[in-house]
Image: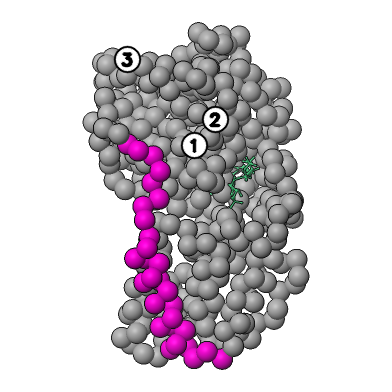
Amino acid sequence: MLNGGVHKPCEKPNRNLSVGNKKPWNMVVALSPLQVIGFPSLQLHMSGIAMRASQEDFENALNQVKLLKKDPGNEVKLKLYALYKQATEGPCNMPKPGVFDFINKAKWDAWDALGNLPKETARQNYVDLVSSLSSSSESSNQVQPGTDRKQQEYENLVVTSEDGITKITLNRPTKKNAINTQMYQEIILALKAASNDDSILTVVTGNGDYYCSGNDLTNFMDIPPGGVEEKAKQSAVLLRDFVGSFIDFPKPLIAVVNGPAMGISVTILGLFDAVYASDRATFHTPFSHLGLTPEGCASYTFPKIMGPAKATEMLIFGKKLTAGEACAQGLVTEVFPDSTFQKEVWTRLKAYSKLPKNAMKISKQVIRNMEKEKLHAVNAEESSVLQERCLSDECINAAVNFLSKRAKL
Ligand SMILES: CCCCCC/C=C/C(=O)SCCNC(=O)CCNC(=O)[C@H](O)C(C)(C)COP(=O)(O)OP(=O)(O)OC[C@H]1O[C@@H](n2cnc3c(N)ncnc32)[C@H](O)[C@@H]1OP(=O)(O)O
């Protein structure tokens, strides 16, 4: 296994798996338009809109809103939500949510404020509002790909290929690269594309000061018609597919950890073939604090990589490791000073990308195949346990505390 840092040598190179203090209103800020609006397009079909031509415009607008690249802000998102509800259900006659149910109360207030506005007018206003947003929407990609060959467009990632290396950059820097539902899906797609492209190595890194702050805690706010149980089920399926795509990834996969890493972005590192970290990076898995349990196969890979006692400190007690500590535990391959991190890592990776492609790929597969079945079984078990945990009071309270800005990790 690649290990033994030049700058900060790892003492234990046995990584044997290749493997609230703000306003309550601010809670809504973190939500994507669809998360605030929280409707499936199916609901539209069921609700029976009176005017056919206008329904088409309305449906188009519903699709357009999903493609907005720029967050329109809370005020607009609430307006969209209210107009949508008015257009499909008419005036608000739902019971008013409790005073501490901040998000639902804000949504209820916005809808109720429309009074007796006719459904047709609400529909028209919705279409007009989306059209004005679409025309002012700009690309949210903040990474300049330079001379890299840029691949498919993603909302939350920038994927480039150069020198035989496909680079997948997590690109939500204003949210510390937290992984929202769409981003999980995009990462699965990007890994699929990278496994089929002609690159030799695949790299995952982050844009901005964080590598990744883990699961986007607003993911659980977008509740489907089937309710919270259905949401937990969908999340568990998505999680299993997401982790599965790392287990099955066929080429050498390298993490370039440019800053702090949290939650699922840490656990999944146990499935990478090499992890290079800036000395600014930290590794934090505060699952118990969030009422959650480990995922990303960490319940299996971490004890194997660092021994059960150290794995327990991280996965059960939420101990945050520095890059040097993570290297000493075998989770990180090598640590570099932040000032020279990018230069040194990319020089290294470019050299590795010149090694014989097939030999590296087959070696990775031989190593991984020893563990694959076990890893898939662990992934299924972890996802199923998490499906239950998502519904626990411990987890819901932790998410509400974060969203109401009462807690940070
Ligand atoms: C398919 C489902 C699978 C479920 C798998 C289970 C997954 C488990 C995990 O990944 S557990 C880890 C979850 N992550 C967290 O709990 C981190 C929460 N965030 C924080 O504690 C802090 O934001 C911070 C320490 C990462 C950074 O603090 P600070 O430097 O003070 O910055 P801000 O808090 O102001 O953050 C800026 C901006 O980003 C938003 N944000 C950051 N992290 C997340 C997140 N994980 N989810 C949602 N939003 C996040 C934060 O709210 C700020 O947004 P704002 O500017 O206020 O709109």
- Find residue 101 and report its horizontal and vertical position in percent: 71, 67
Please name which of the two marks, 2 or 3, marks the residue nearer to the observer: 2
Camera-side mark, 3 or 1: 1
Q: Residue at x 46, y 28 (%)?
A: 255
Distance between mark 3 and mark 1 Cα atoms? 25 Å
Q: Give whichever of 47, 90 is nearer the camera.
A: 90
- Residue nearest the observer in this picture, 131 or 310: 131
Dot 2 amino acid type: Gly
Q: Is 292 or 171 nearer to us in this picture?
A: 171
User: Which residue range is magenta in the image?
Assistant: 116-145
Residue 130 visible: yes
Check whether the beta carbons of the residues at disc 3 and disc 1 lie within 8 A of each other. no
> Which residue was labeled with disc 3?
351
Q: x, y (%) of residue 150?
A: 27, 39
Q: Quadrant of ligand 1?
A: top right
Identify the residue under disc 1. Answer: 208
Q: Regarding mark 2 in the picture, which secondary structure is present there?
A: loop
- Say which of 400 and 40 sits in front: 400
Q: Is residue 305 visible?
A: no
Separation (CA) of disc 2 from disc 3:
23 Å
Secondary structure at numbered mark 1: loop
Mark 2 / mark 1, whichever is N-terminal: 1
Question: What crowding class fits label 1: few (fewer than 14 Cα within 10 Å), some (14-19), or many (20 or more)?
Answer: some
Dot 3 or dot 1, earlier in sequence: 1
Cβ(mark 3) to ligand 1 < 8 Å?
no
Q: Main secondary structure of the magenta part?
A: helix
